[in-house]
């Protein structure tokens, strides 16, 4: 692909993302991937956007693949009943490794789509997925295409472009999930940890008419202040301007020893910016939320989602 065509395609994707950022309540932020304590206050912040010029871009189409259930998937707790199906989603013809963990009973199920933290390995959140099934949720885990840590390890040089690619991956997974017969399309939630929380915030805001709510586990909002781009700026670099337009409910969970959400660890700016947010802190939890802290994350968020449903959100 010559340089001009590559720049044209990049610009086209940029324009699509930015157009979806400008929506109001009740509008959809659809971007096709295979073809391409509660607060009310908002903040006015400066936004950096790309100036796009483009011709129509062509992408490859491929249907998600849903193999048979994995009979080898096991749990140390025999009282927990669940089943797992391996999945493959696609973006621009490239595979995205995934799996869905189902609760007992028959679907369609309320479904949670999980976005990993920076370079977290596939399966990192399996224990959380299994615990969510005890509350009746199906959970989709997946691996970002750029989610494998380089050797030697280093942070992404062009963080803005890196996050943009993950946003497009989550678009593809969200679109593909809707084709699963056991997924309740009217009850899809997005879960994101750390950098995955940042990605989830973008997608949740841009496509909020398709999503019931967001679960953000110590989201890395600070990273928007240090984003770098190799080419054009393809996403908003001020996350608070973006999420001020997110009118679906959001729960943010952090820990007294966690660090990623904001420098003050209290998510104050996020809570002010989000129109409908709730905030919980787990005593003693670090940024990894391992073991009992992960259990508390699931228990707290599940109770919040139940309350939202009772309130008709």
Image (cartoon, grey):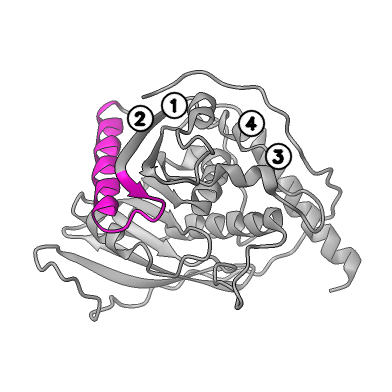
Would you call the spot at circle 1 few (<14 residues within 10 Å), some (14-19), or many (20 or more)? Answer: many
For the residues labelled 3 and 2, say whether their Cβ atoms are less than 8 Å apart. Answer: no
How far is mark 4 from mark 2, CA to CA? 23 Å
User: Which of these two is toward me, 232 or 159?
Assistant: 159
The residue singled out by tag 3 in the image is 19
Residue drawn at the location 26% of the way across and 43% of the way down: 302
Residue positioned most to the left:
79
The residue singled out by tag 1 in the image is 276
Magenta span of residues:
284-311
Q: Nearer the viewer, mark 4 or mark 2?
A: 4
Q: Earlier in the sequence, mark 1 or mark 4?
A: 4
How far is mark 3 from mark 2, CA to CA? 26 Å
The residue singled out by tag 4 in the image is 241
Q: Nearer the viewer, mark 3 or mark 4?
A: 4
The residue singled out by tag 2 in the image is 313
Secondary structure at badge 4 equals helix
Q: Earlier in the sequence, mark 1 or mark 2?
A: 1
Q: Answer with the quarter of the image where residue 278 lies.
A: top left
Residue 272 part of the magenta-drawn span: no
Q: Position of residue 280 (x, y in %)?
A: 34, 35
Residue drawn at the location 23% of the way across and 45% of the way down: 299
Q: Position of residue 241 (x, y in %)?
A: 64, 31
* Left or right, 63 with reference to 93: left
90 up-or-down from 159: above or below? below
Position of the N terminus by quadrant:
bottom right
Would you call the spot at circle 2 few (<14 residues within 10 Å), some (14-19), or many (20 or more)? Answer: few
For the residues labelled 1 and 2, say whether their Cβ atoms are less than 8 Å apart. Answer: yes
Residue drawn at the location 83% of the way across and 65% of the way down: 6
- The answer, for residue 284, to whether it is visible in the render is yes
Q: Earlier in the sequence, mark 4 or mark 2?
A: 4
User: Which of these two is toward me, 90 or 308?
Assistant: 308
How far is mark 1 from mark 3, CA to CA? 23 Å
């Amino acid at each position: 692909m010559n340089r001009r065509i590559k720049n044209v395609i990049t610009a086209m994707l940029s324009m699509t993302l930015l157009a979806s950022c400008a929506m109001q309540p009740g509008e959809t932020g659809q971007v096709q991937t295979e073809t391409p304590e509660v607060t009310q206050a908002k903040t006015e912040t400066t936004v950096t956007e790309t100036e796009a010029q483009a011709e129509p871009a062509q992408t490859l189409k491929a249907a998600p693949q849903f193999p048979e259930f994995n009979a080898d998937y096991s749990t140390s707790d025999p009282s927990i009943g669940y089943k797992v199906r391996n999945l493959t989603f696609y973006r621009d013809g490239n595979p995205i490794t995934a799996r869905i963990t189902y609760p007992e009973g028959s679907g369609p199920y309320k479904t949670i789509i999980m976005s990993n933290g920076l370079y977290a390995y596939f399966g990192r959140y399996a224990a959380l997925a299994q615990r969510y099934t005890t509350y009746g949720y199906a959970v989709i885990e997946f691996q970002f295409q750029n989610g494998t840590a380089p050797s030697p390890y280093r942070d992404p040089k062009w963080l803005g472009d890196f996050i943009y690619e993950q946003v497009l991956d989550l678009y593809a997974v969200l679109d593909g999930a809707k084709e699963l017969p056991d997924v309740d399309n009217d009850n899809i939630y997005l879960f994101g940890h750390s950098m995955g929380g940042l990605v989830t915030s973008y997608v949740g805001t841009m496509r909020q008419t398709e999503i019931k709510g967001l679960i953000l586990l110590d989201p890395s909002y600070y990273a928007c202040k240090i984003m770098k781009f190799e080419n054009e700026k393809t996403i908003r670099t001020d996350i608070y301007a973006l999420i001020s337009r997110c009118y679906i409910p959001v729960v943010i969970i952090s820990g007294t020893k966690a660090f990623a959400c904001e420098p003050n660890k209290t998510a104050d700016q996020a809570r002010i910016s989000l129109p409908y947010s709730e905030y919980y802190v787990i005593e003693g939890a670090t940024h990894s939320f391992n073991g009992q802290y992960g259990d508390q994350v699931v228990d707290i968020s599940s109770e919040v989602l139940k309350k939202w449903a009772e309130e008709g959100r």
